[in-house]
C-alpha cells in the first residue's frame, strides 16, 4: 500500500474538505514566511502555496503533496486575516452590499515530481449588513483565522447574499480541482 499523501496546511477547513474526498493523508504544517503583495492577490496566493509546497517537498519528496493558500481580494487589494474582532467587524462593514474575489492557489505534486500550481477564483457577494448583523455573525464565528474575517460555511447565510464559482474554493480548497488531480494520480 502506498504512503498517505501530505496535506501541507494548518487549516481545519482544508483538512475537512480533503477528508470528504476519502483519500488517506497526513497533515504537516509548513513553517514558512508568508508573502504578502498588497496589490497582487493572485501572486500572493500562488507564491505562498509554492513556499508551503517547497517546505513539504524538502521533507517528503517521495509522497504526493497538496498545499494551498487562500487570499480574499477586495477592490484589487489583498485582505488578510483580521488581527482582532474589531478589525473583523471593519472588514464586514467594508464588504457590506459589495462583492469580492477569493483566490485559492493549490500546489499539487506526485512523488519526486514538480508541483503543478492552479489558481481558482470565486466571487462572493455580501448582503447589506447592519451593525446588529455584524455583531450577531461575530458572536457565532471566530473570524481571526480566516482570510477576510469570515467563513462562508459557518453561518454564511447571515452575511453572504450569493456566490459564483467553487464553494469549497471560498472555504480554502477547491474540491473539484483536487479531486480531478487525485483521480489522474490514481488516488481516488
Image (cartoon, grey):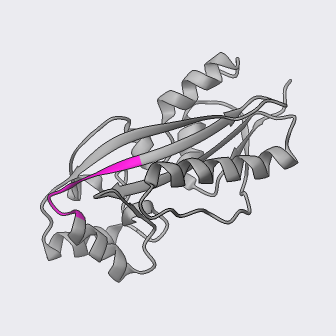
Q: On the image, which quarter does residue 92 sit in?
A: bottom left
**In this orientation, which residue lies closer to the viewer: 47 or 150?**
47
Identify the image quadrant of the C terminus.
Answer: top right
Q: Residue at x 35, y 73 (%)?
A: 88
| Magenta span includes 98 | yes
Residue 93 in picture, x, y percent from top left: 21, 71
Q: Is residue 84 left or right of residue 75?
A: right
Identify the image quadrant of the N terminus.
Answer: top right
Residues in magenta? 95-102
Q: Residue at x 86, y 48 (%)?
A: 59
Q: Residue at x 84, y 32 (%)?
A: 3
| Magenta span includes 6 | no
**In this orientation, which residue lies closer to the viewer: 70 or 9?**
70
Q: Is residue 147 above or below residue 2?
A: below
**In this orientation, which residue lies closer to the viewer: 151 or 108?**
108
Residue 147 in picture, x, y percent from top left: 44, 61
Q: Is residue 70 above or below residue 136?
A: above
Amino acid at each position: 500500500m502506498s504512503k498517505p499523501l501530505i496535506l501541507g496546511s494548518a487549516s481545519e477547513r482544508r483538512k475537512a474538505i480533503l477528508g470528504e474526498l476519502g483519500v488517506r493523508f497526513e497533515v504537516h504544517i509548513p513553517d514558512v514566511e508568508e508573502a504578502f503583495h498588497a496589490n497582487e492577490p493572485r501572486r500572493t496566493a500562488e507564491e505562498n502555496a509554492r513556499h508551503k509546497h517547497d517546505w513539504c517537498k524538502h521533507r517528503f519528496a517521495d509522497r504526493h503533496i497538496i498545499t494551498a493558500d487562500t487570499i480574499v481580494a477586495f477592490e484589487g487589494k489583498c485582505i488578510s486575516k483580521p488581527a482582532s474582532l474589531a478589525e473583523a467587524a471593519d472588514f464586514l462593514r467594508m464588504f457590506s452590499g459589495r462583492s469580492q474575489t477569493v483566490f485559492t492557489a493549490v500546489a499539487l505534486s506526485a512523488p519526486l515530481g514538480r508541483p503543478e500550481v492552479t489558481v481558482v477564483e470565486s466571487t462572493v457577494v455580501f448582503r447589506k449588513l447592519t451593525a446588529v448583523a455584524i455583531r450577531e455573525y461575530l458572536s457565532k464565528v471566530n473570524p481571526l483565522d480566516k482570510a477576510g474575517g469570515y467563513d462562508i460555511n459557518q453561518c454564511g447565510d447571515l452575511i453572504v447574499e450569493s456566490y459564483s464559482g467553487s464553494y469549497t474554493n471560498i472555504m480554502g480548497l477547491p474540491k473539484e480541482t483536487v479531486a480531478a488531480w487525485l483521480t489522474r494520480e490514481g488516488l481516488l
